[in-house]
Structure formats: structure tokens, C-alpha cells
Image (cartoon, grey):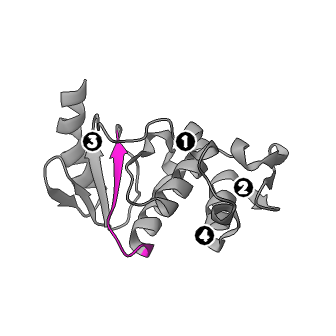
Amino acid sequence: MLNVIVGDVKEAIYNTSVYFNNSYLDSWITDPFGKKIIKQIDKAEVLSAQAVDSHALGVIPVTKISGGAKTLLLVLNEPKKIFNVSTCGNNCAPLLLEIADTLKTDVTVNLRHIMDFGNRTFNIKILNVNKTAHNMKEFVELMIPLLHQEA
């Protein structure tokens, strides 16, 4: 299940790009799910553990993939840590749910905005209030008061 903590989280990793650049393993990039993340988020093909071919940028090092792709790769490969997924765009939401469904453990992330998970049903537990949202309407209703507390 995907668990969300809204607001400041002492143990969360906020600068996911720097963390990724200094901690990723080659296997994360060449793994089928890693390739899927890079293809869907960055519209890029993995050439090797060190390079991807981006339609927009040409051949780039893995450290230059988008912040969203980096964050999803971190969530997938280090599920015990809490990452700030507000570095991700809404295009990352379906894969974030897929990662949570694929892993055999709960995944907890930090979120500081209302991410659009689309018109689907899901199970996202908001740990701040210990309630589970099953669709965007419920998610928004749980998130708004928490985000107002942060402001």
C-alpha cells in the first residue's frame, strides 16, 4: 500500500536528485521496471547502466534523467526510506501506485502538494490522519486541511 505523510518529515530525503546521483546502482537502471520508469517518465531508452537515449536531449548520462524518474527509482529500490515525491510531476502518479502495488511491503512517501492520481480507484493511506483514500475526491478532502496546516 502507498502511505503518504503530508508536510515536514524529519527523516525524509528531500533532495532526491542529489541522493540518487550519489547512491544509485547500475542494476536499478537495467532492471525491467527501471527501464519502464525511464521510458514512461522521460520518453528515453536505456542504452546501458550509464546512458539513456532521450528523444529531447539525445544520449545523456543516467545522472541527467528527470527528478521524477530518479525519485521513482529511489522509491522502488529503497522502499524503507521516505522520499519527497513532490519532486515528481503528475505523470509519475500511476507508476508510484504501481510500485506500491508491486512491492511486498508498504511504501511511505512524503508529499507536499495534491498529486493527481486520476480517475481510478486506489488505496492511499494518509498517515497524518490514519485514513485511506480510495479515489481523488477522498484524497483531496483528506489532503486540503493538512496542506492548510503547513501554510
Where is residue 113 drawn, in percent x and y? 36, 38
- Nearer-N-terminus badge (2/1): 1
Q: Residues within 10 Å of mark 4 (few under 14, many from 20)?
A: some
| Residue type, numbered disc 2 | Lys
Residue 6 tag number: 3
Locate residue 51, reporting x and y percent: 80, 54
- Residue that label 2 marks: 43
Contact check, label 4 and label 3, Cβ < 8 Å:
no
* Residue 105 shown in magenta: yes
Give the residue type at disc 1: Tyr
Residue bearing mark 1: 19
**Residue that badge 4 annotates:** 33
Select label 2 or label 1 by which is in front.
1
Number of the front mark, 4 or 2: 4
**Which mark, by number, is residue 91?**
none
Locate residue 77 relative to residue 38 in the image: left or right.
Answer: left
3 relative to 13, above or below: below
- Magenta segment, which residues? 102-111
Say what amino acid the circle numbered 4 marks: Phe
Indicate left or right for 21 with 8 as reference: right
In the rendered picture of this protein, how many numbered marks are placed on residues? 4
Q: Earlier in the sequence, mark 4 or mark 3?
A: 3
Whether 57 is drawn above or below 69: the answer is above
Nearest to the observer: residue 33 or residue 141: 33
